[in-house]
Image: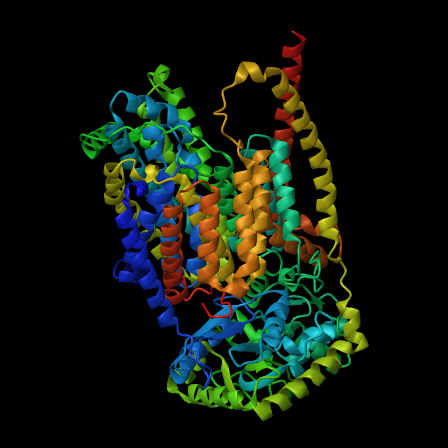
Amino acid sequence: MLRMFSNVQAGMLLAVLCASSVFCIGIVGCGGESSFPQRPISLICPWSAGGGTDRVARQLAVGMESELGVPVNVINATGGGGVTGHTRGAQARADGYTLTVITVELSMLHWRDLTSLTYRDFAPLKLLNRDAAALFVRDDGRFRTLDDLESAIADSPTAIKASGTAFGGVWHLALAGWLDSRGLPADAATWISINGAGPSIQELLAGGIDVLCCSLPEAEAVVAGGQVRCLGVMSEERIAGFESVPTFREQQHAWSLAGWRGLAAPRDTPVDRLEVLTEAIDRVTATAAFRDFMASSGFDLSLEGPEEFRETLGRQDELFGAILTRDAFRAVSGEHFGPLMFPAVLGLALLVVFAVVIREIRRESAVDATSEPVAGTGTGTEFNAPWRAAAVAASVAGYGLLSESLGFLITACLMLIVLMLALGVTRRVALATAVVASLMTYQLFGVLLRVPLPRGFWEW
Amino acid sequence: MGETILVAAEQTLFDPMIWMIVVATAFYGVFLGAMPGLTATMGVALFVPLTFWLDPLPALAGIVTMVACAIFAGDIPTTLVRMPGTPASAAYANDAYALSRRGEAGRTLGVMLWSSVMGGMFGAVVLMLVGNRLAELAGWFSVAEYFWLYLIGLSCAVIVGGSSLSRSLLGLLIGLLLSTVGLSAVHSQARFTLGYPELFQGISFIPAMIGLFGLSEVLRAAASQSSVRPKIFATGGAILGPAVRLFAKRLGPWMRSSLLGAAVGILPGAGADIASWVAGAVSKRRSRNPEKYGHGSTECIADACAANSASLAGAWIPALVFGIPGDSITAIVIGVLYMKNLKPGPEIFETQGSLVMSLYLVFILANLVLIPVGLIAIRAGGWVMRIPRNVLLPLITLMCIVGAYAVSGSPFDIALMGLFGLVGLVCERWKVSIGAMVLGMILGGPLEERFVQTLSGSSGSPWGFVERPVAAGLALLCLAIWIGVGWSGYRDRQRGEKSISR
């Protein structure tokens, strides 16, 4: 159909395309770096979209956008229990255009030898909130106070099962640390590794575990419903909104532990840019919208400026270091069912099945070889031009290699032209389609939907 | 309950955003379905990066609508050029083409459209009736029961899906092994990461999915060059009228086929394509003129179309209730739900009651929208098929790349997507089941998690797996399934040996 274009039409089309591409690039802008910020800021969230940290990040992004006058894009760099996102945030170019929502795991991961990253790799900007840990049990009268629970655990070690997060997560530490502070072994309660508070609550209700350790807002619904009882919260003072819940300290248990979230930039970010960012964040966190959001989400707002936040981070690091390097906890970390057990079973099964399949394929090809001239029912076009598939694969690889330096527009356009020519499209159609498609994709995804696209030297 | 319905209706029907998404994805779905070689699953995989920037309901509405429309639109090239637009249309390709040759292309497509809409509606009703009930039951389940449930789901997928048991099993095991990359939910040590921090949390699901379902199809289409220009039949005459009259005469078979379709949809690993084969076969056995089947039987088409559309909603049942996908599309949906922090499971019916209710409405809405959009698609005839493939394939390649990159903005994901594209191509070549592999990748994590949790709960004794009565029952069921498979395999072999010796 496209072949019907006459030369004149095609020429006009190209002219329009060139004009529109110049226009688009003009919108994107490539001005000098006289003032900060000039271009979109990326806000890295180490946790997945929809979770608590992500919601805080997105709320913050909206506020910062209006304060700074540039788009602030949230990128969910999940993985490694927080390792991936924190690493990416710390290693990003220290120009103030990449910020990270750092979470309590930053104080824990390096003590567990999961990364070498510490809080010292960041320039802290603002502490946003703290979530104190709390202990919950089924409200069946078995445990009424912390002391009841403590003596039950002391009487029959490992009989009490607890959960609230994965093994070695912040809530696990909270429980183990409490036991340790009471002179009990840190693994006196058996920790079942369940990912997240939600499933742990279900397990508590189904009778699979006896104790739940997580933050107050996470278990609010079942506590209000009367099925679950909160024995105490591990904070210095009672939590706003949960005034009926006593603290550990009130019950003569000197123990407190909380998770936290904050905002940080890479360590070597220039001071003047940090100041601009800090001011903007101060204004955002002071708005009623932000405070309402935090309150309605059940996040305990706890604001600290850069200096204070840095000290808090130092203290947190020492605290978690003390817990995690203690012999008691080292013993807990030794898991009974090693990480390679399940893959080993699968690998063995795979070998067996693979052998069977290979034999099957051999037999089939033997049958095919004898009966091919007779059958001939296939269309004969399946996999008859493997080089064309290779061209597609190569274009993907080429895009992957070039896009980070050339930027999306140029790379996409080049890739489309080369691939279409390789597949036998006429030069004119290939050129026109490539230019239109890459510009449209850029506008639709990059500008309208704010999907991250690779940015090269020229920012587009 | 009544209040939830009202809230749901308000969220769905009075939200212009939903309408926009539904209409837009309807056209997108029709386009994808009508292009031979582009499947509904691929459409969903390419749509996923966009769902990142949508609220959960519009995201799910988009997927539901797109799939419903794509499965119908797959019938268009099937009828006009005997090239199944999606695998779900393959079961009646011969019938449809035979009717076209008699000049009945328009009427046939009308029957397909109406049957699809009605089948889809039936499926939605089944979803509504069964979903909540099953969720109540699931509230009793602890980790041991889930372990067996996942194992049963995986077993079904291996048995029902694919042509050969051993190759489905191979696909499944590869998928399960891939799922063990990175940190597990129960260990603090990452495995098989080869030093890439990107692999710590495991293989990123969306890029892998786009590679397996999107890029691999592009690679295959590119590698299979055909110089034959197909003749495309015209669609004229009355379309919907005769279809509705036929439908009114065949209410019984419609119920039967839709129910069959929904049941096949519920089975993990079996989706629309298997539903239409099964419904076609049953329809033939029950028909008064079975000799017509395969040579232009409208009955076969009506029944199979109803079944494949009904299976779509059926597949959502295990996906929502247990997090076990009913087909490859819901496998991706589960990934989307996790991304949106909506963990599939019995709780979702309580915590997200209005969302689930809205989802039901969306299924109805999607099928209603399919009527006008489908009519337009039929009238527009085969223009989609005239778009040169060589132009389209590079564009889809670009979409695959953009989608893979969008998830976390990392070139690593592009490489991952490319790699999985090649894996998909190789698997396709040797007929190793990609569907089973994806299921393995999704359920591998939870399966291992439940396995270790159950063991650590019982201090290492395997007794923990069958301690609770429900768990023991499920274990017996699982055992029975495999004994059944082994027995029928043994019988087949005996029969085979006999026939050879004769």
Residue displayed at 36% across by 31% down: B78
Residue displayed at 30% across by 45% down: B367
Scheme of colours in the image: rainbow
Name the residue at the right extreme: A327
Name the residue at the top extreme: B502
Q: From the viewer's perspective, is B41 left or right of B164?
A: left
Residue displayed at 42% across by 35% down: B88
Is A28 above or below relative to B372? below
Number of marks present in the image shown = 0
Is A269 above or below relative to B209? below
Q: From the viewer's perspective, is B208 left or right of B114?
A: right
Is B205 above or below relative to A182? above
Q: Position of residue A271 (x, y in %)?
A: 56, 90
Residue B410 shows up from this direction? yes
Q: Position of residue A249 (x, y in %)?
A: 64, 88
Q: Name the residue nearer the viewer: A152 or A58.
A: A58
Q: Name the residue nearer the viewer: B1 or B365.
A: B365
Picture quarter containing residue A143? Answer: bottom right
Q: Quadrant of the C terminus of chain B?
A: top right
Residue B435 shows up from this direction? no
Q: Name the residue nearer the viewer: A13 or B147.
A: A13
Q: From the viewer's perspective, is B288 left or right of A396?
A: left
Q: Quadrant of the N terminus of chain B?
A: bottom left
Q: Name the residue nearer the viewer: B452 or A70.
A: A70
Q: From the viewer's perspective, is A55 left or right of A12?
A: right
Q: Position of residue B34 (x, y in %)?
A: 35, 39
Q: Position of residue B291 (x, y in %)?
A: 36, 14
Residue displayed at 55% across by 60% down: A402
